[in-house]
Amino acid sequence: MFYRENGQFKSSYRADQQIFPIAQDRIAIALLLLVAFVVVPLGVSDYWMRAILTPFLILSLAALGLNILVGYCGQISLGTGAFMAVGAYAAYNFHVRIDGMPLIASMLLGGLCATLIGVLFGIPSLRIKGLYLAVATLAAQFFTDWAFLRIQWFTNNSSSGSVSVAGLNVLGMPIESAVQKYIFCLVVVVVFALLAKNLVRSAIGREWMAMRDMDVAAAVIGIRPVYAKLTAFAVSSFIVGVAGALWGFIHLGAWEPAAFSIDRSFQLLFMVIIGGLGSIMGSFFGAAFIVLLPLFLNQLPAWLGFSISTALASHLETMIFGALIVFFLIVEPHGLARLWSTAKEKLRLWPFPH
Amino acid sequence: MKLKSIALTAALVASTLGAVFAPSLAQAQAKEQFFPLLVYRTGPYAPNGTPWANGKQDYLKLINAQGGINGVKITFEECETGYATDKGVECYERLKGRPGVALFDPQATGITFALTDKVPSDKIPLITLGYGLAASQDGGVFKWNFPLMGSYWTAADILIQHLGKKEGGLDKLKGKKIALVYHDSPFGKEPIPLLQERARMHGFELSLIPVTAPGVEQKSAWLQVRQQRPDFVLLWGWGVMNSTALKEAVATGYPREKMYGVWWAGAEPDVKDVGANAKGYNALALNGSGPDTKVIQDILKQVHDKGQGTGPK
């Protein structure tokens, strides 16, 4: 009843092609951005911003990058942790070795280095598909694990192998407090989400989706597989690299290669699968599910009033989390984003039954 | 003999409280002091982390049973980190806001690195008992880090001096081969600069053999040990890496008498699985071992006998 397009006529192509054609959607997104930019920094505690919302934003950016590769282009990648690591360490090297390098510039350059590595490890995709490609990208993961542990130059010859950054600022404004870090991550994520959404709606996005659906047919109608696959790897790695730089600089502050281990790659892949392959919104849902749910499960016994040992809580969290993943994949194999779209479709008819 | 590990942990906490409560006396006016406990009871480091966490809780309960610190009771809450840096940071953020937070003891070098950047702005003492950033001994720079009971540089130095004494003088180390089998993480890499300096000073050959974390797979490392035949092996491991290293030493036939572990490689859970084959293995110890120390007797009497013990005796 409320969620209908009645009376909303578009009189230009531009209006017809906008990302949110329905006015109610536009209002909802405007409200969401208002809450995210204004209400949250003012009303939410530091703990929530530092420990929950900031990691959620950074991981949803990484999931967004991975979704472009896995969801839109259909190339399975298990090397996301590696690309995050490349982004983080490259940004660190630019930040530390060049005096006065602006933070945003070093992060974008870190993303570019991740792009180069991503394209390099994406070359096998021109010959192999599916699970075999997953194994080839796994090689990227282990290679970067080794490289950042063994090659001293990457960690600025730190004796312990751990690196840290301090005194971050953008155009003179410091990025130190929880609010500043949160707003910085939010701005980066909003900009990249907008760019990614427009990219997947454009010609190149359609090329990616064609490669995903039927690569032989796509090649027959004139889509160059090399161009499509490598650009997917390039764009995906860039976004993931910037997310890695954010993770290291903003969230952790000091990190070692174990922060970008294979567990991180699996975590991001699960986010994308559960959130919804081939959906920008799905990356956010998946990240919310995987970041927030374990924390919620961890704190649930305390809220319900009974106390259990931390080991038991940790094990229960893993078990319940796994069971929920299986449940969601049975109920909706296309992920949470599809559940959301279905709900919106039903809202268009509500409350009138068919 | 779980008591050996309880002794280890209890002695650690004993020196913490002794050294730290001088600056915290101002807060003793409040009725309670909150101790956040960052522990890992899951994951590959749980074999050592669990008894450590149990011992810490037992000691805090002992202090409470004896009336608290100048009458101030201790409240505590555990937070599971699984030895992961980001979980440790999340636990820190969650618990630092509680009223009357005394200190943080992350039990992990990786988490220590991440928290070292955060504690100066939050103004909470970060206690690192025999682990952590060796450079934080410089209190002028690291004002909120308190590395107690020695750092990894101290540990490595003690080992080299002991080996020198065993050989009849540090100059007798010249020409010997010493291998460092270390956990490939900041924890394992900390002693390397000191060992390299000592190698330069005394003329022994230092070979570095990293073991990929968490250290369950060590066959290639010990193959290198077998090929190089070092005179001594320094074991710098934690958690499941220690027992695996000893089992691999048995498998490759390296005499355990020539193995010297850091204090994190010398606890009961490390040798329990290996059994009689671990006989002869040496390790540094931060405390007395066995159930006869007064602290252990007190804990057994005042905490465990009253049914308040954490974990098995």
Image (cartoon, helix red, strand yellow):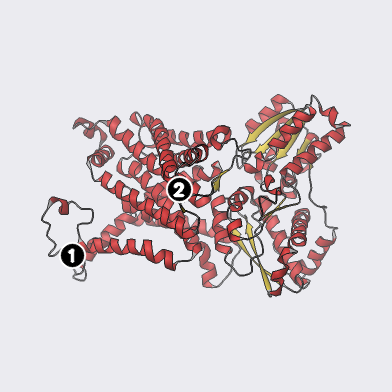
Q: Which residue is mark 2?
A: A246
Quick check: can you spot residue A163? yes
Q: Residues within 10 Å of mark 1 (few under 14, many from 20)?
A: some
The residue at which mark 1 appears reads as: A4
Q: Nearer the viewer, residue B19 or A303?
A: B19
Q: Which mark is residue B98?
A: none
Q: Quadrant of residue B257?
A: top right
Q: Amino acid at mark 1?
A: Arg
Disc 1: host chain: A
Q: Secondary structure at mark 1?
A: loop
In the picture, measured across the screen, residue B267 lies left or right of residue A99, that is: right
Q: How far from the left and from the top, in percent, is residue B169?
A: 87, 32
How far apart, in angstroms, are the residues tagged by discs 2 and 1?
Answer: 39 Å
The answer to whether B207 is drawn above or below residue B4 in the figure is: above
Q: What is the quadrant of the N terminus of chain A in the image?
A: bottom left
Location of residue B71 with respect to A321 vertically, above or below: below
Quick check: A147 left or right of B112?
left
When the figure is inspected, residue B290 is found, relative to residue A80, above or below; the finding is below
- Tag 2 subunit: A
Q: Secondary structure at mark 2?
A: helix
Measuring 24% from the left and 46% from the top, which residue is drawn there? A201
Instruction: Tell me the residue at 37%/49% (across/down).
Output: A273
